[in-house]
Structures are given as structure tokens and as C-alpha cells.
Image (cartoon, coloured by chain):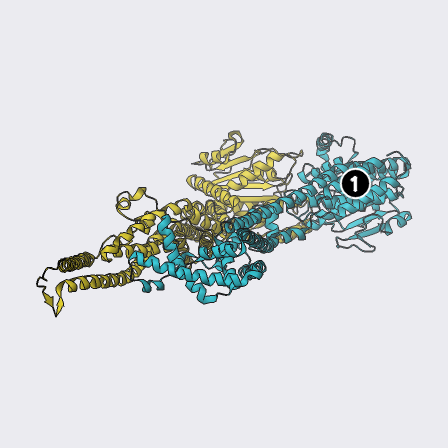
Amino acid sequence: MAPGADTSALLAALEGLGEQVVELRLPLDAPSAESGRRLRREIADQLEDYVLPRLRRIDAPLLAVVGGPTGAGKSTLVNSLVGHRVSAAGVLRPTTRAAVLAYNPADNAWFEEARILPGLRRVTGDGTADPSSLHLAPSERIPAGLAVLDAPDIDSVVTTNRELATQLLSAADMWMFVTTAARYADAVPWEFLRAAVTRGTAVAVVLDRVPVEATEEVRTHLAAMLTDHGLGGAPLFVIPETTAYEGLLPPDVIDPVRTWLHGLASDAALRAAVVRHTLDGAVRSLSARVFELAAAADEQAETAAELRSEVDEAYDAAVRHVDAASSDGSLLRGEVMARWQEFVGTGELMRALESKIGRVRDRVTAAVQGKPAPGADLAEALESGVEALVRSAADEAAERASTAWRARPAGRALLGDDDLRRSSPGLQDATARAVRDWQTFVLDLVRDQAQGKRRTARYLAFGVNGLALMVMIVVFAHTGGLVAGEVAVAGGASALSQKILEAVLGDQAVRSLAEQARADLHRRVSELLEGERSRFTTRLDEAAVLESAGSALRASVQDVEDSR
Amino acid sequence: MRLRGRHRRADLPGMLAALDEAVEALDGRADKAALKRAREVSARAGERLRLSGEHTVVALAGSTGSGKSSLFNALSGADLSPVGVRRPTTSKAYASVWGTEGAAPLVQWLGVPRRQTAWRHGSTDAFGNERLSGPDTELDGLVLLDLPDHDSTVVEHQHEVDRLVELVDLLVWVVDPQKYADQVLHERYLRKLSGHASVTVVVLNQVDTVNPFAAAECAEDLRRLLDEDGLRRAPLLTTSARTGSGLDALRSLLVDAVSRRRARNDRLVADLEDVVERLVPCVGLDEPPGVGSKERSRLVDALSSAAGVPVIGQAVAESWRLRAAGSLGWPPARWVRRFRPDPLRRLHLKGKDRREVRHMVRSSVPEPTPTQRAQVDTALREVCDRASDGLPEAWQRSVRRAAEGRSGDVKDQLDQAVVSTDLGVDRTPWWWKAAGAFQWLLVVAAVVGAGWLAALAFGSYLRLPDPPTPDAYGVPLPSVLLVVGVVLGLLLAWFGRMVARAGAVVRRRRAESRLRAAIEQVVTSLILEPVEEELERHRRAREALDRARTG
């Protein structure tokens, strides 16, 4: 960023990006979701707390945040700089729970308003332990144009402390990183320092509580470590261990730090350079992290699509299964016949008679064709047949979809404690209802088709049945039975009736009738299974994963890059 | 201060065996990580139990710069472990062994390098010199380890700590006023050790760096944090390796632990309880209800229908009637029967071929309809749901797998069951032959009567004098023969048909119930027994876990 360059385009682009990041939802527990959510919060915080306010007022005082591990003496350092206790220091860990901001009263206007860290409530007067507040401590000892913020520890056992520290550090123009001789090699603080390097934040390191005899060795080692981590240019201050532990550090000990800060404060150009360095680094580091965030958003969309396709696969298979089962004919033919009989109005008596004739007819055809006679007991009631089919298919699909979802963390989270491995309890009733509706539909179909031919149809139906009776007698005479008693034994005459049906309506009409009936059954079954499917898909819909979120983020980053 | 050991001396080998049994039974049916951990703990406990029980392994663990090494050196009375200002200091564990009898394999098992191990008999110091102050046998049986730090930038240290923390009998966590509230320490280690309070000691070291009042305050705050971590029972000591304050208390605690020789068992029991607690949710608390009789009979019904039992039943009745007609029917009309093949034969369920090559024969019973298949699926699902009700999901799945495991065989076995079931239609009732013979007799009588009448008619046609014809009750004998032969024959055929019909119903029922029994057997051996085995396995796992928990 060139000095004095117009930053309004960049600001607008960053504001756009900020909105998108804030609005981004990562509801599914995809593998990257956890880190993505953290990243989203970090990016949003950094934009909100630092980058945007800083860009809006590039001339605001430089904010140096004092951060470091628990017990490193951060508060003591700030108190010593101020000259009296503004931040509680002590042996209990963690000491500082709320942030304390020390600045020159001349800079009051910059800090009382919610320009930086808008999420924190401003508090003056005596110390507070509320982690969501910012304790303001104006002091003449702090040079104008500079503010020092005492942050809580970054590695404390108290979670809110860690989060607040992270938030404060991301709002800093400069880090004053405080560590001690005992713990300068701790892993957690170094992770923060690494983050500072990637974000391009300016860093100064204060090595506190150094036993006098160890000064040289520790200092060299720390300096080497800093260089290894790409912080070779960072100023390093060593503060020896002193007896005045609880109060303030002796002036001569704190002087190098103070002098350096004053120098920084009085040199506007240097200050501006530090600000720009950090700001530039922050914006630069944003794009890489936003890309990572966009990848997480993409993964959300992918996960959602995968979860959905797993459900679809299971339920599509169920619909196909029912279709295949109903296309083998036994289901449909029986049903169309039943409606036909109702239409022709032959009623119960005729049906009973037909079944008896049918038995004989079956025997005749069986005798002639040499096939086994179908058992009358075998013919399941149609309603229970379709019901059993749909229920079994729905159970199968529910089990499949549920198992697939349970296998993924995202699916598990969406399912929660609900057990969806079986079809919903209301399915059986719904199926019965759907089957009854379908029967009505088929009856209407038959009625429409045969409206003008009703008389013929009825006549034929009776006639053929009478004929069949005669045939039966003849057959019985042949089989050598004693005839009339045999009338009492029976089967099902549907094929014969189908012949009548075909004779009355025509072969083509019967076929289209069956086709329409099948299509309607398919529609109804699909609807039923759709309801079952929605038990899964509504959960996905509620999660409201935006497919385009990732690409929108990338586009915004491109905007930011273009306007830099 | 001393360790508050467990109240009960547990039967550790028995518990370990029970754990192994539970792990074996839970294989594939429980959280993988929990099982892996259980296996590790079991293996490790077995190893540790084989090693010296006379020794107690105590580890000093803690953050970098908390003074573990200083404490270690102070306790062992020699500068074994390097102390320095450069962090991190100790990179490999150091060991100091008091009372070396049998300790060598133990130290080897711990993986501490030989040159970092100091061996001392009661009367010698770290350098093998005679002790001036007399033999120090109090600590005999102590293996003291100085662990590397767990929180520095050097990751290998952390791995080494993680490894050794799992192995040692007694853990002494060394913290200092600066970093006693570190997240890493509490979240990564102490919170996970809440079940190990009986073998955990926390030492607040370097209390000399703050004033006594502040030190007490620190200790109090640390105590609160430890309580929050679930380490209420773990003792907390304050020491200063530099000034030597508090060292005696620590030493006497160690002496106590070593002399009681309970830390090893307590540690292993705590490990064991930890994994058992993690495994318990994988088993659940409820006993599953098992296979219900209602579901069972529904499954048998569905499979019977799918296996074509109704078809066969009808064929049996038909076949019976046909054969009856063959034997009892009116002989002149019996030829019609040839047009009607035996339905059982068409199903391949009849005749010699079936009996002789039973295992090679397949029936021709029609394939199940989609509806029947759906009914079987639903019935099977109901059986599994009921049988595994209340079990954790993994077990429900495994029960389902067990039920379906041999579904490939089910169709074949059902067919075999159908083929090999005696349908009870092969034997012919004795009276059929007699009745059949009688029928022929009647036919002969009718033919004789008819012939006779024809001869008489022919004679009278030729105007021959009528030969004398015997008569019965005033009716000429040939007429009697013809009429009685025909009428009686037809009546007998009708009677035979009626009887055969009743017999067909009986045989049909019998055949169906036999088939059902055969199918039930198949269902039991291929579906229900695997399910029961799985439930038995669950019961075994639960009981083993119970035993592992209670010792």
C-alpha cells in the first residue's frame, strides 16, 4: 500500500468481504467445519476489530498489545510503564481476566468511542473481571499517539481468557510479546508468534524474569529461536528478575522499553510505517485464510450434496423396487379385475361364483397345459400386498439412508438422537389410504372406459359365467365324478373375466388401463416415499448450506486483491 | 501427606482376563478407539504385572522450567539430570533406581537409556561410593524417572512424555507458581487422569520464587483447579528444590508409596476402570429382550408363504384326490385321469426320484412374489428390532448382520426342507386296493350281466327258446348283475370320492404343518440361532465388563 494512497476502494472491498464472512454459515460437521468456524470467527474479528477501523482512520494512535503466556508478568510491565497499578498483578493465575487499555489522555477521543474492538464495553474506574469489557486507563506517562493494551494470557486454563487474548492480539498494530526465562520455549506462545509472522504483525519481544547469571545464555537462545521463526528483526528486551515482584518494576529496568515506546510515539513516520506494515500484512494474510475458509464452505456444499445423494439413492431405489414389483402384473391385474367387477355390478355373489368356476377353469388349463394350478390361498389380499411392498421398501431405504448418514460426523450431527432407521410410524396408515385412493382411481378409469358398454358388459359377464358353469359340468362328466357336488369346489376366474373385459373394451384399452393404473400407483408410492425421504432432507434444508458461498468468498477476495 | 490408596485390593489378573474377554466379544461392535485403548491397556498391564512388583515406578512430569530435574536431583542426592536455564532442558527421561534386584527388565521396559540410569544399592550413592551417612534403604524399590517437558516447542519431548505417562505407576506432576494454570497441563493431562487420583501427586515447586503468603494463595488456587479437574483425592505438596523446603514431605510420601507397593496395582486398576468406563456405553445397560415368539411365528409364516407351502398344500390335496380317483373311481371312467398329471409330480415333490437323490433335487415350487418377499423382509426386520431392542446401535447392526448372514443359504435350505419333508401322500390306504378290486368285480359282474343279457337277446332274436334264467327275488339274474354292477360301482366311486376329499383335507393340513415345522427348523438354524449367538455374545461382553469392573 503506497502511503497516502486512496484506501476507499480497498475499504469497500474489505467491508464487502467482512459481511460475507460474518454471514457465512458452516452448519454441517464436515471434517473442516471446526477449523472453518474458528477461522471465520478469527477473520471476522480481525476485520471488525482491526483492519476496518484502522483503514477508516489510518492516523489513529498506534495500539501495542501486551500478550504472552500466563504468569509472564504482562500486567506488571503495563503497570510499570504507566507508573501505578492499572492492571491487577498477582500470583494467582490467570491474573488479568479483562483487557486494560492505557493511553495518553490526549488520545481520549480515539478510544472512548467504539472504533476499535467494538464488541467490548468501555469501563473506567477500578478494575473489572468482566471479560467482555475494556477497562480504560488514561495516563500521562504513556506518550500521545500510542496506547498499550494489557491482554489476558494466551495459554490459560480459562477458555474465555484465551479467546479474549486472541481477539485482542488480532486488533493490534504491534505485539509486545512478554515471556519469561522459565518458559520462553513453551509451545503455545510460539504458535501465536508464528501466527503473527503469517499475519505480518509487527512484534517486539520482552523476556521477563531472567536470572542475572543466565541472561546471556537465555537471550542468545531466544534470539536464535526468533530468527528461526522469521522474527529476527524484532526488538528484544531483557528484564532481569528483581525482588520487587509484586509492585512495579524498578525504573532502570523498565527504561529500555519505555524509551523505545517513546521513540516510536514521537516519530510519526516510524509509527505510520509500523501501522502500515501490520495493516498490509493483515490484508495480505487475509486472502490466504479466506481461501481456506472458502474451501471449508465448498466442503460444506459438497457434504450437503453427498448427504442428499445418499438419501436420494436409498429412496430412488425404494421407488424402483416398488415399480419393479408392481410391473410383474399380478398386483395390477388383480386390482383392475376387482374394479371391473365392481363396475359391472356383479357383486359378491358373482365373485363367489366366479371363483368357483375359476377353480375348474384352472384345472382345465392346468390339465391341458401341464402347469401347476395356482393356489387360491396364495393370492394375498391386494391391499396388504401393496402395503407390505411399500413398507418394506421404506424400511429398507430408511435403514440405508440412516446408516449412510451415521457413518459421517455431519450426518450424525444432523440426525442427533433421532432414530430414523425405520419408516415413520404413520406410513402404514398413509399407505392404506393411498391404496384406497388408488382403487377409486382405477374404478373411475374403468367407468370412463366402459360407460357406453355397461349393458353389454353385464350381459356378457353373466353369460360367460353361465357358459363356464356348463363347461364345468361337462368337464366333470369327463373326469368321471358324480358331478353336481363338485360345483361346491372352486378357484378364481380372473383370466376368463379378463377375456370378457378385453372383448368389451378392446385389447388396447385394457392395456392402457393397466398402464394408467400403474402410472398412478407409481405416483402415489413416490409421494409416500417422498414423505419418508423428507424426514432426512428437511434436516439438510434446515441447515441451509449455500452452494455458492465458497465462490462468493473467493470473488470478494479477488476484489480486495484488485483494490490493493 | 500420603497417597490415599484405593479401599480394596482388586483381583487384577482376573479383571484383566475379563477385560480381554469383553474386548474379544466386543470386536467390531464397539467404538474402535475405545477397543484399541482397551487392548493397549490390557497388554501393558500384562507386561507390567510380569515385571518386578517390588519396584514402584514414579515419574516427575511437568512443564518446561518447572524444576523437575532439580527435584529429581534433590531426591536422588546427585546431579544426574542436567539442570539449566536454556529451555527445554531434559530431552530424554532419566532414571534413578533404588534397590536394584529385578529392576533391570523393568527399566528396559520403560525404555530409559542405560547411560541415563543410576543404580544404587542401599549403601552406595549415585556414583557407587560408600555412603557416609549409612545405608539408605528407605527408598529401596523406587524407580524415579525425570521426564522431559510436555509443553515446549520440541514435539518429540511431548511424545516421550505421553509414552511414559502411560507406563509409570505413580505420577508426580511438578508445576510452579508461574504456570500452574496452563491450559495444556490441565486439559491435556490432568483432566484425563481424574480416574487416576490415587496414583497422582501434584507438587507446586519453586515456591521460593514468591513470598510465603503468595505461595499459600497459589497452592489454594491450584487445589481449586485440581478439584475442577476431578483430582480431588490427589495430594498437593509445595516444595522448593532450591531451598529444600517440602522435600521431606515428598520423600516420605514416596517412601510410603514404595513400602506399601500398591501404586502399581492402583495404577493398573485405574487404567482398567478408565477403559471399562469407555466400553460400558458400547454395551449398554439393558439386557435385550431376545427373539419374541410372535415375531418368530410371523417370520415362519412369511417364509412358509414364500417357500410355497400353500401351493404345495393344495397340490397335496389335489394329488390325493387324483390318486383316490385312480384307485376308487369307476373303472370305465378312470382313463380320464391320464389327462391330469399329478400336481405334486409337477412340483418335483413326488415319487421315487425325490427320495433317492434328495440332496440333488430342486423343487419346482414357484418363485416368491414381490409381496411375499417384502413380507419376509418386514418380518425379518421385526425379529431383529425386537431381539435387539435397547442395545447400542452397533449391536443392533450386528444382530441384523447375524440374521442376514446366511440369507444366501436360506433359499436353498428352504427348498431342501420342502423337498425332504415327507408329505404323507406316498402310502396308499389298505382299503383302496380292496375297494378297487371290488370295483373291478362289479364291472365284471356288470359285463357278465350285460353279456348274458346280450346272449339272451341274441337267442331270442334267433327265435331260440329262452334258456332257463335264474332269478333273484323275482328279477332275472343277468339284469341284477348289470344294474347292481353299474349302480353299485357308481355309488362306490361317489363314496370313494367323498372319503378321499375328506382325506385330502386332512393330508393337506398334515403336509402343511410338516412343511411349516421343517421351515421353522431352517429359520431357527439359519436366522434365529445366529441372532441368539449374537445376543449371547452381547451377554458375554456385558458380564465380562461387569467382572472387569468389579474384580
Identify which residue, A59 or A347, lies in the foreground.
Answer: A347
Which element is circle 1 on? helix
Identify which residue, A51 or A68, lies in the foreground.
Answer: A51
The image position of residue B309, as x and y in percent, is: 36, 54
Chain letter belonging to callout 1: A
- For mark 1, what is the residue? A556
Q: Name the image quarter holding residue A464.
A: bottom left
The image position of residue B159, as x and y in percent, is: 58, 36
Q: Is residue B160 above or below residue A538?
A: above
Q: Is residue A513 toward the left or the right of residue B374 in the image?
A: right
Residue A437 visible in image: no
Q: Residues within 10 Å of mark 1 (few under 14, many from 20)?
A: many
The residue positioned farthest toward the front in the image shown: B463
The image position of residue B544, as x and y in percent, is: 42, 50
Identify which residue, B82 or A545, lies in the foreground.
Answer: A545
Q: Name the image quarter holding residue A224.
A: top right
Query: What residue is shown at x 46% (from left), y 66% (from top)?
Result: A348
Q: Is residue B15 toward the left or the right of residue A419 in the image?
A: left
Residue B298 visible in image: yes
What colour denotes chain B?
yellow
Q: For the image shown, how many numbered marks are present on the structure? A: 1
Which residue type carries mark 1?
Answer: Ser
The residue positioned farthest toward the bottom in the image shown: B473
Q: Is residue B540 toward the left or the right of residue A389 in the image?
A: left
The image position of residue A500, as x and y in percent, is: 48, 57
What colour denotes chain A?
cyan
